[in-house]
Image: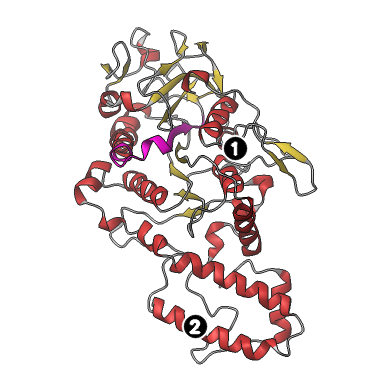
């Protein structure tokens, strides 16, 4: 079952020989009903982390987070920081519309976000200080500039590391695969693979939605899982008496128990039963992968997941920027994000759930010859809602071309510090590299206007 068994366990099984059951299943893979490899976990570490958190018994603020990551670099000019007085070569093809906050305008392709502005805040003066893909995923999603010698962990991994498990569900889940891992973006880095996200690649909008590594394969019922567990216990009882490595058997049993705890837990099955949602609510989020992923993110938070990253790709609009945004990219965001915020608020969850929309960087003030915008390293936007973020706050300003912040400038490490403070993570949190060197994970300042 487990692709990441400890070396001791592997050696023990090799020495003991292969123990097959009547259906041809060996002891090693007798519980082959899905693997925890998707969690990025080695189960000894998974269990150790779980125990350590339980043993600490420290009261912490139970604020969770949903991070929306639009991979590629979403244009700030054509969304939340329009420049209607600029030349067409800068302002682009879109007009502007008024928002729920007097004096604040968005582009015309964001009617729902404009109407719901009082539920979220916009930072117009983010300076990413970077215009490269890959390193953006690392820097923006950790708050620490890429360093080849130190793998700085992403927010969800730090949340998992510091706060641990609330239920059998993993603390950190990523929906979709639109994160660039080349420089360690979206991963646990120096914290260790046990704090990587559970990556769920299945499309929650699919008619037959199930989750690899969680749902038993066809033909394997939960009753059958229980029978196999009973068989394992009986065989172990016979083998233990003459076994020379009882510690290895004990560890293996813990692995199986941990896997079964997740696979058989009622909250696991319930979390992914998105088809049981009211069809009208599903329609409100949008019947597409991104919309249903946002709905699933809310369900996961309800089921004990602490941090969910919802990913969406193809935002690198060097060509056909305006057609791509208006027809394909923005409509799903403009529908799903307001629906998520409204849903969380109606359920009394918005005060305890931080929602963020982040992206790689901004895009160039000048439109290129392919009707696109290129990478821009000195201006962009960030959005936050919930957890005490002041709804309707539009912070900062860029110059007349949207090229650089001219007021209330903040950086990626400041966004990270704000996120961590909202989640109850101490600013002085220290982690250690594999060789024991201490590393401070948080170095920015909070966005004071949102605290």
* Displayed quadrant of residue 18: bottom right
Q: How is the image coloured?
A: secondary structure
User: Where 153 falls versus 75 (above or below)?
Assistant: below
Q: Secondary structure at mark 2?
A: helix
Q: Please tell me in which quadrant of the rendered image residue 42 appears.
A: bottom right
What are the residue bounds of the magenta stretch?
343-360
Seen as rendered, the residue at the extreme left is: 280
Q: Which mark is residue 228?
A: 2
Q: Which residue is nearer to you in this view: 36 or 370?
A: 36
Give the vertical position of 30 relative to 416 (above or below): below
Q: Is residue 241 left or right of residue 76?
A: right
Please name the residue shown 25% across and 26% down the image: 111
Q: Nearer the viewer, residue 211 or 180?
A: 211
Q: Nearer the viewer, residue 407 or 246?
A: 246
Q: Is residue 341 left or right of residue 44?
A: left
**Quick check: marks 2 and 1 in contact, CB under 8 Å?**
no
Q: Residue 372 at x, y = what percent? A: 41, 25
315 horizontally vs 99: left or right: right
Figure quadrant of the N terminus: bottom right
Q: Which dot, 2 or 1, sits closer to the camera? A: 2
Location of residue 375 in the rendering, given as x and y in whole percent from the top left corner: 51, 26
Q: Residues within 10 Å of mark 1 (few under 14, many from 20)?
A: many
Q: Could you tell which of marks 2 and 1 lies nearer the N-terminus?
A: 1
- Give the residue pinned by disc 1: 138
């Amino acid at each position: 079952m487990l692709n990441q068994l400890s070396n001791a366990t592997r050696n023990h099984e090799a020495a003991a020989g292969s123990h097959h059951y009547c259906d041809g299943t060996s002891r090693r893979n007798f519980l082959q009903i899905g693997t925890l490899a998707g969690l990025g976990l080695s189960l000894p570490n998974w269990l150790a982390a779980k125990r350590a958190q339980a043993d600490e018994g420290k009261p912490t603020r139970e604020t969770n987070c949903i991070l929306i990551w639009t991979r590629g670099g979403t244009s700030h000019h054509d969304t939340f920081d329009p420049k209607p007085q600029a030349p067409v070569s800068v302002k682009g093809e879109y007009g502007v519309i008024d928002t729920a906050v007097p004096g604040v305008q968005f582009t015309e392709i964001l009617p729902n976000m404009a109407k719901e502005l009082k539920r979220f805040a916009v930072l117009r003066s983010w300076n990413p200080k970077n215009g490269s893909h890959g390193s953006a995923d690392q820097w923006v999603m950790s708050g620490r500039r890429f360093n080849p010698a130190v793998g700085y962990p992403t927010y969800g991994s730090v949340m998992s590391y510091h706060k641990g498990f609330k239920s059998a569900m993993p603390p950190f889940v990523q929906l979709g695969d639109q994160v660039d891992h080349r420089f360690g973006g979206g991963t646990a880095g120096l914290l260790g693979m046990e704090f990587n996200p559970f990556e769920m690649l299945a499309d929650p909008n699919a008619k037959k939605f199930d989750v690899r590594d969680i749902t038993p394969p066809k033909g394997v019922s939960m009753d059958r899982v229980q029978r196999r567990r009973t068989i394992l216990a009986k065989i172990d009882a016979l083998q233990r008496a003459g076994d020379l490595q009882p510690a290895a058997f004990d560890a293996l049993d813990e692995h199986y128990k941990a896997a079964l705890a997740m696979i058989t837990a009622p909250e696991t099955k319930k979390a992914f039963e998105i088809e049981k949602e009211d069809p009208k609510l599903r329609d409100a989020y949008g019947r597409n992968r991104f919309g249903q992923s946002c709905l699933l993110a809310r369900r996961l938070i309800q089921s004990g997941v602490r941090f969910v990253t919802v990913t969406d790709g193809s935002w690198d609009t060097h060509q056909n920027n305006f057609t791509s945004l208006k027809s394909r990219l923005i409509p799903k965001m403009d529908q799903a994000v307001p629906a998520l915020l409204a849903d969380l608020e109606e359920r009394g969850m918005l005060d305890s759930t931080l929602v963020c929309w982040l992206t790689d960087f901004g895009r160039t003030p000048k439109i290129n010859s392919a009707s696109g915008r290129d990478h821009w390293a000195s201006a962009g936007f960030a959005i936050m809602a919930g957890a005490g973020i002041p709804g309707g706050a539009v912070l900062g300003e860029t110059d007349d071309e949207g090229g650089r912040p001219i007021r209330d400038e903040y950086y990626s490490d400041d966004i990270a510090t704000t996120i961590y403070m909202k989640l109850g993570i101490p600013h002085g949190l220290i982690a250690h590299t594999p060789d024991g060197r201490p590393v401070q994970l948080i170095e920015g300042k909070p966005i004071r206007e949102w605290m």
